[in-house]
Image (spheres, rainbow, N blue to C red):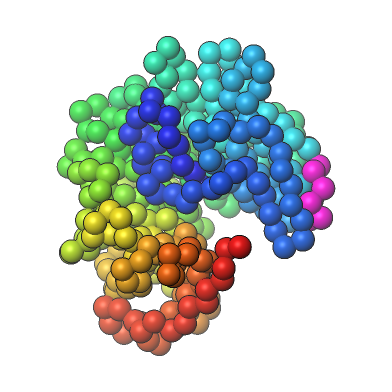
């Protein structure tokens, strides 16, 4: 996830900042090993990771390179933390590139959604990269939105046929920022692109998932200002036609930032993130949508402290698990929350809080 602070990145990176988790450095840690690599842009606290089919760890981010500027950086580690290889990507002498999101296919090929900044007054475009499992470059594709302004990707995924889907935010023509989604085949050839604008408000895509039918589901945010957002959920068919749309309004809360979603085996959608009445103190907000994109229930957890969720999963019984943080006596701690399916089913608006485990971050 990411936070950007350079003033010339404009509102595009504000989208990605407010819908994200702050990272303190480009450091990758699990329970058994730690690795520190590269020299990331000091103003860009951003990295993303995934596992390939062999459970190697693939990490993307950025690094400063002498006489080149900022390059996309991709690193591959084995399960023991041994660095297998590392490669950086640079477009040209007048550009900066930032790796944002990463995924792999069944063969271990690596796909990275990146931001490409070019021009005297830098403007950004989607930059999609493909490398094979041994770090050989395969292709790159650049997408400039209809407004020829700033375009910032945020999420990348693949379908069962190896097609690539990317969503994020894109500056439109007289529409502000829109949710911009593209589909490419495995060779980088564009299949379709879709732009979503809600009443000329600013909109940004956060996460995309694709089901076995090629239908893509996107969560994002939409609002009139950076302190006034709503959850947005979209579903496109395999040809890029918008099938479903849902705006989740949360009365009394002025800032709703989605961060993660998951589907259960019945096709219901669960979204989690944060809501705030004052843009200062946040509560964890979780929403369930049925297969018709109708809101089944909304659950808010937290009090006067700052709380947020960044991960969600659901088991075969419909129990829901959240990962995030909570603030206790001024200290920020990791939090895991479980909602029991029998307490929030049958059309109830919200379920009883079941259990939360808190862990000190030190």
Tell me which segment is drawn in magenta.
Answer: 78-84
Is residue 238 covered in magenta? Answer: no
The image quadrant of residue 135 is top right
Q: What x and y, as percent, mark residue 145? A: 36, 27
The answer to whether residue 202 is above or below residue 173 is below
Query: What residue appears at the point 53 percent right and 13 percent down from the top-left corner?
Result: 94
Is residue 83 covered in magenta? Answer: yes
Q: Main secondary structure of the magenta part?
A: loop
Image quarter hosting the C terminus: bottom right
The answer to whether residue 83 is above or below residue 322 is above
Query: What residue appears at the point 47 percent right and 23 percent down from the top-left corner?
Result: 117
The answer to whether residue 351 is above or below residue 294 is below
Q: What x and y, as percent, mark residue 334? A: 53, 66
Query: What residue appears at the point 81 percent right and 42 percent down from the top-left corner?
Result: 84
Query: What residue appears at the point 43 percent right and 79 percent down from the top-left corner?
Result: 339
The image quadrant of residue 307 is bottom left
The image quadrant of residue 149 is top left
Q: Is residue 362 left or right of residue 292?
A: right
Q: Is residue 345 left or right of residue 260?
A: left
Outermost residue toward the bottom in this view: 342
Question: Depth check: 18 or 58 in front?
Answer: 18
Question: Depth check: 11 or 144 in front?
Answer: 11
Report if residue 162 is visible in the image: no
Q: What x and y, as percent, mark residue 361? A: 57, 63
Outermost residue toward the front in this view: 329
Q: Is residue 319 left or right of residue 72?
A: left
């Amino acid at each position: 996830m990411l936070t950007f602070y350079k003033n010339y990145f404009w509102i595009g990176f504000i989208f990605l900042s407010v819908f994200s988790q702050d990272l303190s450095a480009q450091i990758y840690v699990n329970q058994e090993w730690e690795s520190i690599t590269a020299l990331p842009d000091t103003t860009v606290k951003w990295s993303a990771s995934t596992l390939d089919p062999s459970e190697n760890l693939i990490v993307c981010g950025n690094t400063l390179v002498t006489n080149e500027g900022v390059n996309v950086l991709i690193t591959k580690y084995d399960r023991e933390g041994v660095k297998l290889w590392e490669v950086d990507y640079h477009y040209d002498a007048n550009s900066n590139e930032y790796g944002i999101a990463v995924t792999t296919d069944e063969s271990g090929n690596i796909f990275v959604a990146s931001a490409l900044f070019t021009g005297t007054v830098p403007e950004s475009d989607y930059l999609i990269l493909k490398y094979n499992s041994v770090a050989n470059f395969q292709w790159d594709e650049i997408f400039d939105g209809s407004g020829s302004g700033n375009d910032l990707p945020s999420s990348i995924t693949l379908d069962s046929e190896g097609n690539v889907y990317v969503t994020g935010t894109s500056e439109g023509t007289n529409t502000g920022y829109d949710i911009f989604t593209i589909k490419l085949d495995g060779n980088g050839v564009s299949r379709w692109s879709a732009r979503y604008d809600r009443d000329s408000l600013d909109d940004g895509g956060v996460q995309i998932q694709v089901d076995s039918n090629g239908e893509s589901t996107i969560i994002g945010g939409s609002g009139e200002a950076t302190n006034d957002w709503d959850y947005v959920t979209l579903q496109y068919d395999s040809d890029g036609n918008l099938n479903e749309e849902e705006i989740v309004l949360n009365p009394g809360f002025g800032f709703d930032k989605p961060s993660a979603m998951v589907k259960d085996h019945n096709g219901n959608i669960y979204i989690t993130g944060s809501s705030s009445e004052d843009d200062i103190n946040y509560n964890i907000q979780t929403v369930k949508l049925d297969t018709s994109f109708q809101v089944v229930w909304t659950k808010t957890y937290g009090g006067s402290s700052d709380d947020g969720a960044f991960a969600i999963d659901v088991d075969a019984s419909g129990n829901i698990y959240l990962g995030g943080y909570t603030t206790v006596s001024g200290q920020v701690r990791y939090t895991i929350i479980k909602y029991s399916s029998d307490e929030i089913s049958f059309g109830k608006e919200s379920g009883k809080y079941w259990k939360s485990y808190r862990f000190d971050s030190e």
